[in-house]
Image (spheres, grey):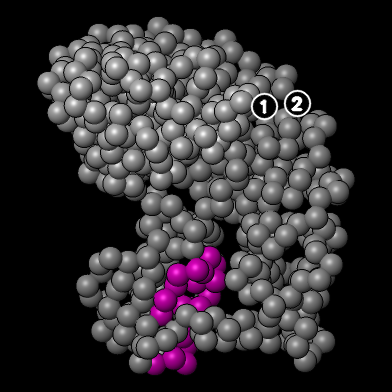
Amino acid sequence: MLPRFKKAREIADWMDSRDYPLVACYENQIEGYSRAAFLSDLRQLPAAILAKHLVDWREITISRCFKGLKRLPLINEVKEVLKALAERLNTLPIELDAQAIGNALYGLQSMDAKNEAVQAVLCALADKITASSASLNAQEIGNALYGLQNMDARSEAVQAVLRALADKITASSAMLSAQAIGNALYGLQNMGARSEAVQAVLRALADKITTSSARLDAQAIGNALYGLQNMDARSEAVQMVLQALAAKITTSSASLDAQAIGNALYGLQNMDARSEAVQAVLRALADKITVSSANLNGQAIGNALYGLQNMDARSEAVQAVLWTLANKITVSSASLNAQEIGNALYGLQNMDAQNEAVQAVLWALANKITTSSARLNAQDIGNALYGLQNMGNFRALPALIKHLTNKYPADFSYEKTPLEWQMAVASYLTIAYQTQNVNLRALISQHLKRLFPTCSTNQPNEIIKQIETMFINKLKLTHVKNSQIDLHHLDYLSASLLLNKGLKETTGVNAIIFGAGSHSKSAHQHKMRDIVVNYCQTNHIATKEWEKGRVKLDALTQPSNSSIWRSPGFVSNLNVKAPAFNPRTKASN
């Protein structure tokens, strides 16, 4: 039973107990204290927090209450506690000191900002941080930003906190430690860099990283880059952080372990290699990976290559990373599971096999796939094939696809589960039309016929043509309705195929709904738009009213016969890719 609190400090002691952390209570780790009993107590806590007889609230008291919530899931009981704490904080005539700011935000690390209770807390904290005269030290900067790790920057509440913290970081005279650098950037992992608030924090951190004398250890390198996973390198603020980190990585004496290698490269997944800042990071990482004695496990291999998904292999920096990863994969003792196979190949989607470094990675992965005992599901297969979309003329691709086929489920059919298999089908068709290898086309036709057992022909080229027609017709039935094309729940290859081939004989369409693309995070919202822009420009279709993930078409006439379907991998200037697939990994804390 919840104690009858006589002082606010007693509430803080209960919520921020070293011996009985709230998360341990929730997870049934406290002997004699069940989860049901804990939740019952938690339901009584808001009334205790708002009790009028408690008049001894101080900045340390309220901040400890927030800190005690760390790692608790955002269940209804926790939401009510947050509402009570926000209400209490708004009524307190106190100024938060630096430790209170760090602790309060640190406690929110498992909360997202879509919930009104979390937003209420953030708004209250933003006001208090702005009004505070405190100067944050390195640990407090790291803790404050670390607590935002589960939030994106779309809400005004998050942006208000970020603006307040950016000012505090800029005004601070603290020199950031390696841990503070890693924790601060790690906390931004769910944020894109489009908002001015995020950019302000990045600029402030870039200056702090540049002037810091700290030598980054492996964990700090991995965590720092991991935190950039939802950002591209188009903004100056991101480039400033990348340049600062590249210099730190170069001068670091740390030997990267497998997790640090995987996390560091995974964090670059939304960046292409055209900017000097990205190339500087890649060169620094390539050197570190080369001298590392780490034996890469399957997760590190999958995450490292997954992080290269927006890069082609034309730059020397990318090639350097590919060569050193190929060597590491070759000597690794790891056996890849299904997800790791899918992630690793998926990361090669913007590369072709004319480059020797790409070939080296493919050979290394082929050996790993051959020896793996994993069984692949539809999503793993789709990711793997999507990554091979530009590898049609790699001489070992038929053997590689055969090895993948051996890991397919015993019973699979597009017609039974179309949503699960659509990316695999679209990828097969892309490779088939791009390859000059007759044997590969024959192999692909066999696989496609297994996915579409109602196909009525046995000649490889005819199988491919017939199944393409069947696939497009299925897409049209689902996604072309009421004079609109709705691209939701489509991967980017299937969307491109539907638009560029499926609408040749379709008239009367007056709008395209593209949203953010299937399973996409906020950082990927422009990708499906790029597909639509490319389609309209190629086919000379006039557009108007681009807003809220929808565009109106003046007229959809039949495209000229010269119009061809190009896979997104060939539209490199648009930086188009398939929807992001979350590889279920976390950086270490």
Res. 295 mark? 2
Q: Amino acid at mark 2?
A: Asn
State the SS at label 2. loop
The answer to whether residue 116 is visible is yes
Which image quarter: residue 532?
A: bottom left
The one nearer the camera, 9 or 393, is: 9
Q: Residue at x 49, y 14 (%)?
A: 18
- Give the x, y percent position of residue 375: 80, 55
Q: Which residue is mark 1?
A: 258
- Left or right, 119 with respect to 581, comes to left
- What residue lies at 53% left-to-right and 75% top-to-bottom? 497
Q: Which residues are magenta?
A: 485-507
Relative horizontal placement of residue 553, taking residue 139 as reference (left or right): left
Task: Look at the image and say whether residue 288 sits in the magenta stretch.
Answer: no
Q: Nearer the viewer, residue 133 or 333?
A: 133
Please identify the quarter of the rendering in which residue 548 is found: bottom left
Q: Residue at x 66, y 69 (%)?
A: 421
Residue 185 visible somewhere in the drawing: no
The residue that appears at 80% across and 62% down in the rendered structure is 408
Spatial distance from mark 1 to mark 2, Cα to Cα?
7 Å
From the top left corner, tell me how far across and down residue 168 is, in percent.
22, 20
Check whether the beta carbons of the residues at disc 1 and disc 2 lie within 8 A of each other.
yes
- The image quadrant of residue 426 is bottom right
Indicate the amino acid at tag 1: Ala
Give the image location of residue 282, x and y in percent: 53, 31
- The residue carrying pointer 1 sits among few (fewer than 14), some (14 to 19) or many (20 or more) residues within 10 Å by Cα, namely many
Where disc 1 sits, the SS reads helix
Instruction: Give the total of numbered labels.
Output: 2
Seen in the image, is 396 located left or right of residue 137? right
Give above or below for 371 relative to 68.
below
Towards the viewer: 395 or 120: 120
Disc 2: CA contacts within 10 A as few (<14), some (14-19) or many (>=20): some
